[in-house]
Image (tube, rainbow, N blue to C red):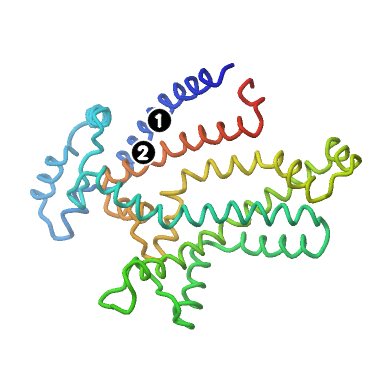
């Protein structure tokens, strides 16, 4: 199969997947317990006011009618209007996306590079002190819940040492730092939290795959020819062991905007994860469905990018 045909086939497969997940998300969210009109109206609102809100947002229509209208709007690129913010959902997601990208992309890239390097280092020194130290530290980090680790970092760096701010994106009423420097200072702790939480996955995965690949016949042949251990692990073992790592890295695209929910909540970081959390709390259906739709698209696109990288590392994939 040619490269072009492979891409066309994968793109054709994406459309029904996105449509099916979109319909499923709509039904799950709209059939869940809770009434957005009651939440928006407040505790002391009259029934007449609640009924008026339900009618204005179309919540009194049958579920199939609302689904039809939602799909029609999506085909026009309209994600609806947020109940809470009274703004187009697309504009809100665009703004929140930028904020989350600042937080997640840097930590993800650093995690992939450092985790892969440490995993390969541990595999190269299998059974020795370096391997045991890296494996034990990664296991300890893996057992830490993200919210608990975040609060530990806040306690140490923000409360005890007072080196870094504990929450938000910017400081209020403080002119000690420029806006960019202040943003970087607020970015360190949440990024470090995500980095430490995701690091063990790449270390363990890379180590196990490199150790497995190092037992293959072609690695023994390379040793017999006289290649150095450094060249064997760098040019042969690591390259072929990267396929599972590429899978995890590609699928992590889906968590770029939604997977940082706990981190954004702990550090009051106003990104996509926090947006979805607030949307659930407020029963803001358009906002929740918009966030889930973005996540769905990212999962599918991440899968496609993963396959393309697979093809670069192992051209046999395109014919499978």
- The residue singled out by tag 1 in the image is 18
- The residue singled out by tag 2 in the image is 293
Label 2 Cα neighbours within 10 Å, binned few <14 / some 14-19 / many ≥20: many
Answer above or below: position of 100 versus 222. below
- Closer to the camera, 208 or 147? 208
Answer above or below: position of 24 versus 92. above
Q: Is residue 320 left or right of residue 18?
A: right
Instruction: Please identify the quadrant where the N terminus is shown.
Output: top right
- Secondary structure under the numbered disc 2 in the rendered image: helix
- Secondary structure under the numbered disc 1 in the rendered image: helix
Question: How many marks do you count on the picture?
Answer: 2
Verify CB contact (< 8 Å) between mark 2 and mark 1: yes
Q: Could you give the CA–CA distance between mark 2 and mark 1, rounded to whole angstroms?
A: 8 Å
Q: Residue at x 57, y 55 (%)?
A: 111
Q: Is residue 8 left or right of residue 249?
A: left
Q: Residue at x 53, y 41 (%)?
A: 251
Instruction: Please identify the quadrant where the C terminus is shown.
Output: top right
Rendered location of residue 300, percent (x, y): 46, 34
Residue extending farthest right:
224
């Amino acid at each position: 199969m040619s490269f072009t045909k492979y891409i066309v086939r994968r793109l054709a497969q994406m459309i029904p997947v996105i449509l099916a997940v979109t319909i499923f998300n709509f039904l799950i969210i709209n059939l869940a317990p809770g009434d957005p009109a009651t939440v928006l109206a407040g505790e002391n609102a009259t029934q007449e006011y609640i009924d008026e809100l339900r009618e204005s947002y179309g919540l009194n229509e049958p579920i199939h009618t609302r689904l039809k209208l939602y799909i029609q709007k999506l085909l026009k690129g309209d994600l609806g209007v947020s109940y809470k913010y009274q703004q187009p959902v697309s504009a809100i997601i665009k703004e929140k996306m930028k904020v989350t990208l600042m937080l997640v992309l840097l930590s993800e890239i650093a995690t992939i590079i450092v985790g892969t390097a440490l995993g390969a280092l541990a595999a190269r020194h299998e059974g020795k002190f370096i391997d045991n130290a890296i494996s034990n530290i990664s296991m300890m980090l893996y057992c830490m819940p993200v919210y608990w680790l975040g609060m530990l970092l806040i306690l140490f760096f923000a409360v005890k040492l007072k080196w870094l701010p504990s929450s938000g994106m910017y400081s209020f009423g403080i002119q000690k730092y420029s806006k960019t420097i202040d943003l970087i200072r607020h970015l360190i702790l949440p990024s470090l939290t995500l980095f430490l939480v995701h690091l063990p996955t790449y270390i363990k995965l890379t180590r196990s795959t490199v150790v497995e690949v190092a037992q293959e016949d072609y690695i023994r042949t390379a040793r017999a020819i006289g290649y150095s251990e450094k060249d064997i692990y760098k040019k042969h073992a690591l390259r072929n062991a990267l396929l599972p790592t590429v899978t995890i890295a590609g699928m992590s695209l889906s968590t770029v905007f939604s997977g940082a929910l706990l981190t954004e909540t702990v550090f009051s970081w106003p990104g996509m994860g926090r947006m979805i959390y607030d949307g659930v709390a407020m029963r803001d259906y358009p906002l929740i469905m918009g966030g889930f739709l973005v996540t769905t698209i990212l999962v599918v696109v991440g899968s496609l990018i993963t396959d393309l990288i697979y093809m670069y590392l192992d051209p046999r994939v395109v014919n499978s």
